[in-house]
Amino acid sequence: MNSGISRRLAVPYHPEQNGLTERKNCTLLDTIHYLLIEAVLSPRFWVEAINTANYRCPTASLDGKTLYEAWHGRPNLTYLREFGCKTFYLNMSVGKSKLDARFKEGVLVGYSKSSKAYRVWI
């Protein structure tokens, strides 16, 4: 099956041979740097930040579309939230009383890949 993807090898430690990939990586690194600073999160959340950055990053070779949009069409963006924003989640702790808080505060750090849910750091 040919999806229009070609594989080209490059010599290790010579980024000039792989300019497009290096430019994309530079864009992603700049984006995650600013996402983490703006959200006041530690660098240990770099994986969550890079997933968010890659998801929202348009590509010039795809007429300004994201990779998801190129493959699946226009996505539903109503569930997107700001990376690192304050969020609340349902407290489902066992043994809580009727007067305990029903919701707890967390920080949104990404989106679940397996369900329609957010990833929240608590």
Image: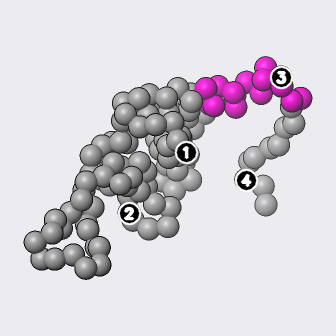
Upstream in the sequence, badge 1 or badge 3? 3
Give the residues drawn in magenta, as a range.
11-26
Residue 18, given in percent of the width and then of the height, sits at: 77, 27
Q: Does residue 97 appear left or right of residue 89 in this picture?
A: left
Residue at 78%, 23% in the rendered image: 15
Return the disc, 2 or 3, that comes first in the chain's sequence. 3
Height in image: 75 above or below 82?
below
Q: Of marks 4 and 2, which one's residue comes earlier in the chain?
A: 4
- Alpha carbons under labels 4 and 1: distance apart: 27 Å
Q: Nearer the viewer, mark 1 or mark 2?
A: 1
For label 4, the crowd category at 10 Å Cα-Cα, with few meaning under 14, some 14 to 19 and many 20 or more, is few
Image disc number at residue 3: 4
Q: Name the residue rendered at 15%, 69% in the picture.
A: 100
The amino acid pointed to by label 3 is His
Query: What amino acid is at disc 1?
Result: Val
Above or below, 57 against 2 in this view is: above
Residue shown at 27% from the left, 61% from the top: 89
Task: Write down the quadrant of residue 1 in the picture.
Answer: bottom right
Nearer to me, 14 or 19 = 14
Q: Which of 37/51 is in front? A: 37
Q: Which residue is labeled 2 in the image?
A: 117
* Residue 106 vertical placement versus 101 (above, below): above
Give the colour scheme of this rendering. one colour
Mark 3 / mark 4, whichever is N-terminal:
4
Q: Mark 1 sits on what residue?
A: 47
Between the residue at mark 4 and the residue at mark 2, the CA separation in whole angstroms equals 30 Å
Residue ID for mark 3: 14
Q: Work out how far the residue at label 2 is from the one at label 3, CA to CA, in angstroms.
A: 40 Å
| Image quadrant where residue 20 sits | top right
